[in-house]
Amino acid sequence: MSILNFGSVNIDHVYRVDHLVRPGETIASRDYQQFPGGKGYNQSIALARAGAPVRHAGRIGQDGRWLREALAAEGADVAFLEVVDKPSGHAIIQVDAAGENAILLFGGANRSITAGDAHGILAHFGPGDWLLLQNEISAMAEILTEAGQRRMRIVFNPAPMGDEVLAYPLDGVSIFLLNETEGEAFTGESAPPAILAGMRSRFPQATVVLTLGAEGAVYDDGGEQIYVAGRPVQAVDTTAAGDTFIGYFLAGISAGEAPRTALERANRAAAICVTRPGAAPSIPRLAEVG
Ligand code: RIB
């Protein structure tokens, strides 16, 4: 059994601000730092720190070699993370006094992945292997289609959400991990029970895990529904909290853990993540999460 995460790698430029900049406004930031990030990268770090054997596929530029080395140092297999002659993806991230963020993305090398590249990588995987996807790379529809044909178990985090996601071939997805905004885009509903009902009716084959920010998360596999409450913490930076949750949850489920156990550990890991600055560096290790 392999876990392939086909996902983005970004350089995050993080600015601490008193409030998120408004249209037409210019404000000064109080601090600036650069961190490794990208939803795909963060989720691979979380998988690796949770003890899962993750293989990360994607693309970076020459400016991103340090990210590849850092991911490998965590124990992830980076043989499918290609260095190309394009700038790496990056994110401009504002973090306000309450730890909330606003993110502007530049896809860069993440968006140069072709259907041919994807085919070359997916050919190494087959039935029973896990595929984790977010929505920050190109060739998404082709990857979803081929992974389905190969009978991989597809775990999809539709972030960042866009209209194009609604047109992706999603019938082969085994697990959706999404927040309320993403759930609303799929179902037109805003209340968590209605989102879950809408997802169940639209994707009857799938397990859905709906994250509720500080309120916790709900798991629904059509037979069992499990709620875990959020943990009260002083948020410093919420960036990568969702990624931490996803990596830890998948690490548990893919290792055969009961959903409640995986959910509770993911919840603890995400709560630790928000107490620290940055994306990937804020993701805790298993020994700390317990
Ligand atoms: O989920 C957080 C991530 O979103 C950041 O690391 C940033 O790179 C964007 O991809």
Image (tube, rainbow, N blue to C red):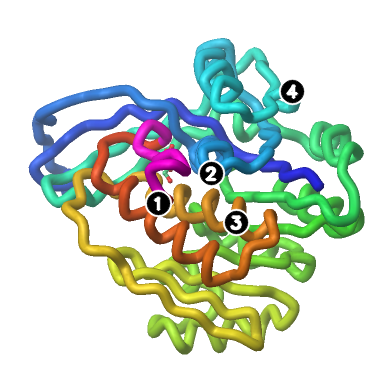
Asked if marks 4 and 3 touch (Cβ < 8 Å), the reply is no
Q: Earlier in the sequence, mark 3 or mark 1?
A: 3
Mark 4 lies on residue: 79
The label nearer to you, 4 versus 3, is 3
Q: Earlier in the sequence, mark 2 or mark 1?
A: 2
Q: What is the number of the mark on residue 50? A: 2
Q: Earlier in the sequence, mark 1 or mark 4?
A: 4
Residue 48 spot, x, y in % from top left: 57, 37
> Mark 1 packing: few (<14 Cα in 10 Å), some, or many (20+)?
many
27 sits to left or right of 37:
left
Residue interval drawn in magenta: 280-289
The vertical placement of 124 against 186, above or below, is above
Asked if marks 2 and 1 touch (Cβ < 8 Å), the reply is yes
Which residue is drawn at the image coordinates 63% and 30% (left, top)?
76
Does dot 1 land on a helix, a strand or a loop? helix
Does dot 3 land on a helix, a strand or a loop? helix
Per the model, the C-alpha gap separating discs 4 and 3 is 24 Å
Q: What is the number of the mark on residue 252? A: 3
Mark 1 lies on residue: 269
> Mark 3 packing: few (<14 Cα in 10 Å), some, or many (20+)?
many
Per the model, the C-alpha gap separating discs 4 and 2 is 20 Å
Q: Nearer the viewer, residue 151 or 46?
A: 46
Per the model, the C-alpha gap separating discs 3 and 1 is 12 Å
Callout 2 amino acid: Ala
Total numbered badges shown on the rendered structure = 4
Question: Can residue 153 be seen by looking at this rendering?
Answer: yes
Callout 1 amino acid: Ala
Asked if marks 2 and 3 touch (Cβ < 8 Å), the reply is yes
